[in-house]
Amino acid sequence: MSDEKRLRVFADDYVTVIAYDEWDATAVYEDFCGSKLLLDELPGWDEVADEAVITIQMEDARDDGEKVTKRAREWIAESGRGFLCSTEY
């Protein structure tokens, strides 16, 4: 068994991030927000299966934006560690 960290997708009801674990997911989200979250603001992260399908509507000033669908593992490979998407932004 390898001790190497592996990126995974984590989501709560509103935000999806790519991180190494739940603690790292919170750190990624805090980096995106630009501030530390209060204890009662911490998301309840659920790990998303590598084969799960995620559709993101890309922002576009001209229209509603193109929808892009990929498996979680593909988003990981393309995007790396960081904020992936939100239903709120």
Image (cartoon, rainbow, N blue to C red):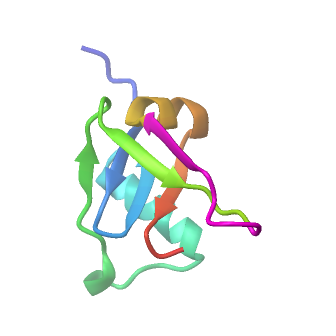
The residue shown at (36%, 70%) is: 14
Q: Main secondary structure of the magenta part?
A: loop
Q: Residue at x 41, y 80 (%)?
A: 37
Q: Quadrant of the C terminus?
A: bottom right
Is 58 placed left or right of 13 in the picture? right
Depth check, front residue: 75 or 59:
59
Describe residue 61's horizontal placement relative to residue 80 as left or right. Answer: right
- Front-most of 57 and 7? 57
Q: Residue at x 76, y 67 (%)?
A: 62
Which quarter of the figure has residue 80? top right
Frontmost residue, 38 versus 46: 46
Please tell me whether residue 2 is drawn above or below residue 39 in the rendered image.
above
Above or below, 17 relative to 64: above
Query: What span is colored magenta in the figure?
Result: 61-70
The quarter holding residue 15 reads: bottom left
Q: Position of residue 52 (x, y in %)?
A: 30, 36
